[in-house]
Image (cartoon, rainbow, N blue to C red):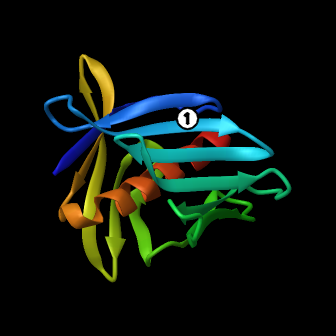
Amino acid sequence: MKYYYIDHPISFPDSFSITDEHANILFQVDTKLNWGRIIKISKEHQTLRILDDKISTYFPSFTIKDENDHKLGCIKRIFSFKAPQLDFQYKGYYIRGDYMTQSYDVAQQATTMATIKHISQGMDKVEIDILKDEYAIDILTFVIALEAHKALF
């Protein structure tokens, strides 16, 4: 299934929707500042994932939690003299391509799980083509975390 959201730098506070190809709202993303940066991904007013970045860390590091506040993993920036480097500790996901240009694949164990690309259809959008819908919330969480990191560089 393909998911879409309007391409924009994620800011704090912010709010935007993830839709299907018919512009039906499937997920809501809300961000806020509260002793750090918090991103909540919800569906029908039920929080499914929380990305929590405490200000006490020098490099941005989003802890990924489920709706019951259980830690599922994290995505953090690591020190590098070259281009920004990220360490992924979330369900074995990694990226192939350049996430800074929004043209990349999300993979797990050498299998492509989703393709992300920037499209222009009157309004700039990001298209997330997820190959298996049962992984949708996890892949959307991963992509939103990448976008949040990109906005902080």
Residue 120 found in image quarter? top left
Image quadrant where residue 153 sits: top right
The local crowd at label 1, few if under 14, some if 14 to 19, many if 20 or more residues have their Cα within 10 Å, is many
- Report whether residue 50 is seen: yes
SS for tag 1? loop
Front position in the image: 19 or 113: 19
- Where's residue 23, x and y in %? 20, 28
Left or right: where 112 falls relative to 44: left
Is 94 placed left or right of 121 in the picture?
Answer: right
Residue farthest toward the bottom in the current orientation of the protein: 109
Location of residue 142 by image quarter:
bottom left
Residue drawn where x is 50% and y is 72% of the image: 90
Q: Which residue is at a point 29% across and 58% down the rendered structure image?
A: 136
Q: Amino acid at mark 1?
A: Ile
How far across and how far down the image is residue 35, in percent?
A: 80, 45
Residue at 20% x, 38% y is 20
Q: Which residue is mark 1?
A: 10
- Count of number-bearing discs: 1
Query: In this rendering, is residue 66 above or below 48?
Result: below
Task: Return the residue nearer the eye: 88 or 81.
Answer: 88
Q: Position of residue 123 (x, y in %)?
A: 30, 19
Instruction: Tell me where residue 92 appears, x and y as whole percent.
Output: 44, 78
Q: Is residue 9 above or below residue 117?
A: above
Residue occupying the far top of the picture? 122
Q: Is residue 87 visible?
A: no
Q: Is residue 56 above or below residue 43?
A: below
